[in-house]
């Protein structure tokens, strides 16, 4: 961001930005920009309260600790706040938004979701006249890079993850990304905006790609499916369902065609239908660009609630993910190479009302296990869960089955 401010004569900002001070955990750390020319603050909260500061930009990270205290200090001091902190907004966004409204200042967080894609502004402002039904997308570039590269190169999860770390797509500790938590923070924020909902992160269902292996991706591909980590916010009669999970998409689905480290968001609603936004979702450049976009907004005096919800809007609750949705499912199992194993598998499914639409079976590997992948016809999830329980009792099942919900193109 400092680099962009220092060459703002080449940007289209509607006014001049001046850096009045900087703060970080370490002043001596090597950085790509020179911070010695600016006032240094050992404590970020002291910087936030400084009388020369009009706008406090928080890029510390973390849902609590110094980031939360500094943002609260800035808001209480009547300063506008711009943050790229998705964890902070997902956990404390409602309280911080209320504080900003009370103080009559802006709380902006475009950089917290999908980096270089201006999806927060699009949802809150450009689509204010649209009744949103669903927001879904690929919100973690690390996970998308992993599933894309594994399928393209035939390498294992561990090999591709190590490469992603070397390339800077994955952190040294990738847990936040591969567990789905990073995408869940972003999905919760988008859902709160899209549906005028009271953000409650405890209701968000989260699972990641750390359990997906190359076999799953290859068998799904043979069935015309692509496995992606999908973040979703969905409006239901009971409230807003928000979840992140691996999903099997038909190969012609708009989200299935987004590869590498890109992010994409698909917004569905009336009367526009579906809108898809795609771009770089992480990294210094996209984040700085989004922050500067929020800075530009502050030159215009109109202040909107942080999540775009006005008093006349219906405040919808976050609710837990649906327990018995109806869908087609991708099922992958490894069977012992023995007579009757495949028949026992299909009989167990049929006994619980699950019918097979497509099936592929590979020859047994060196361990004597034969991989089988099935696409079911649409059925309630409860039927699938009952079938999994029945499968768990089969002696020819080598390990736990993999079950992934399928979404077709629309």
Image (cartoon, rainbow, N blue to C red):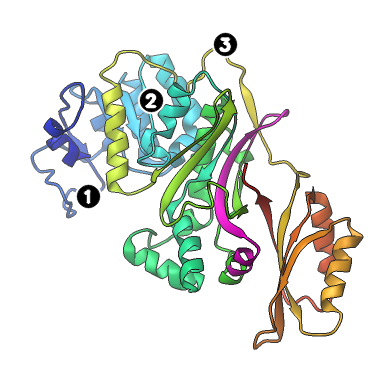
Q: Do the residues bearing badges 3 and 1 touch, measured as CB atoms within 8 Å?
A: no
Earlier residue among tags 3 and 2: 2
- Residue 290: % across, % down: 32, 36
Q: How many marks?
A: 3
Callout 1: SS: loop
Compare residues 107 and 228 and report the one nearer the observer.
228
Quarter of the image containing the N terminus? top left
The alpha-carbon separation of the residues under discs 3 and 2 comes to 20 Å
- Residue 207: % across, % down: 60, 53
The label nearer to you, 2 versus 1, is 2
Q: Quadrant of residue 118?
A: top left
Q: Please report the bounds of the magenta region as a residue range.
A: 218-241
Mark number, residue 292? none
Mark number, residue 26? 1
Q: Is residue 222 magenta?
A: yes
Q: Is residue 15 magenta?
A: no
Task: Report which residue position mark 2 lands on.
Answer: 107
The residue positioned 53% from the left and 40% from the top of the image is 187
Would residue 288 be seen by someone viewing this image from the given angle? yes
Compare residues 182 and 261 and report the one nearer the observer.
261
Q: Is residue 40 above or below residue 344?
A: above
Callout 2: SS: strand
């Amino acid at each position: 961001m400092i680099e962009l401010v220092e060459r703002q004569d080449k940007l289209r900002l509607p006014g001049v930005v001046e850096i009045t001070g900087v703060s970080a955990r370490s002043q001596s750390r090597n950085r790509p920009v020179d911070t010695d020319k600016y006032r240094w603050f050992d404590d970020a909260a002291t910087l936030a309260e400084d009388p020369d500061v009009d706008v406090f930009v928080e890029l510390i990270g973390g849902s609590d600790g110094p980031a939360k205290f500094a943002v609260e200090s800035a808001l209480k001091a009547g300063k506008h706040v711009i943050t790229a902190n998705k964890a902070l907004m997902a956990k404390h966004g409602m309280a911080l938004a209320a504080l900003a409204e009370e103080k009559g200042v802006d709380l902006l967080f475009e950089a917290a979701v999908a980096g270089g894609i201006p999806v927060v502004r699009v949802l809150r402002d450009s689509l204010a006249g649209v009744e949103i039904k669903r927001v879904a997308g690929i919100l973690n570039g690390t996970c998308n890079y992993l599933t894309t590269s594994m399928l393209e190169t035939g390498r294992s999860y561990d090999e591709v993850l190590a490469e992603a770390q070397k390339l800077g797509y994955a952190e040294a500790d990738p847990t936040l990304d591969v567990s789905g938590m990073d995408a869940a923070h972003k999905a919760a924020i988008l859902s709160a905006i899209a549906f005028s909902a009271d953000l409650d992160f405890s209701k968000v269902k989260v699972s990641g790609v750390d359990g997906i292996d190359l076999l799953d991706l290859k068998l799904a591909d043979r069935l015309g499916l692509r496995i992606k980590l999908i973040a979703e916010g969905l409006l239901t009669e009971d409230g807003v369902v928000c979840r992140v999970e691996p999903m099997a998409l038909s190969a012609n689905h708009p989200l299935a065609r987004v590869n590498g480290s890109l992010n994409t968001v698909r917004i569905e609603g009336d009367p526009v239908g579906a809108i898809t936004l795609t771009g770089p979702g992480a990294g210094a450049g996209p984040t700085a660009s989004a922050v500067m976009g929020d800075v530009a907004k502050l030159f215009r005096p109109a202040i909107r609630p942080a999540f775009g919800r006005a008093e006349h809007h219906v405040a919808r609750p976050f609710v837990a993910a649906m327990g018995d949705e109806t869908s087609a499912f991708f099922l992958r199992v490894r069977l012992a190479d023995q007579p009757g194993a495949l028949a026992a598998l299909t009989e167990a499914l049929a006994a619980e009302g699950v019918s097979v639409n497509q099936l592929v079976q590979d020859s047994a590997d060196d361990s004597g296990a034969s991989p089988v992948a099935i696409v079911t016809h649409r059925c309630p999830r409860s039927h699938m869960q009952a079938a999994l329980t029945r499968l768990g009792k089969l002696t020819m099942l080598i390990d736990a089955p993999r079950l992934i919900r399928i979404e077709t193109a629309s």
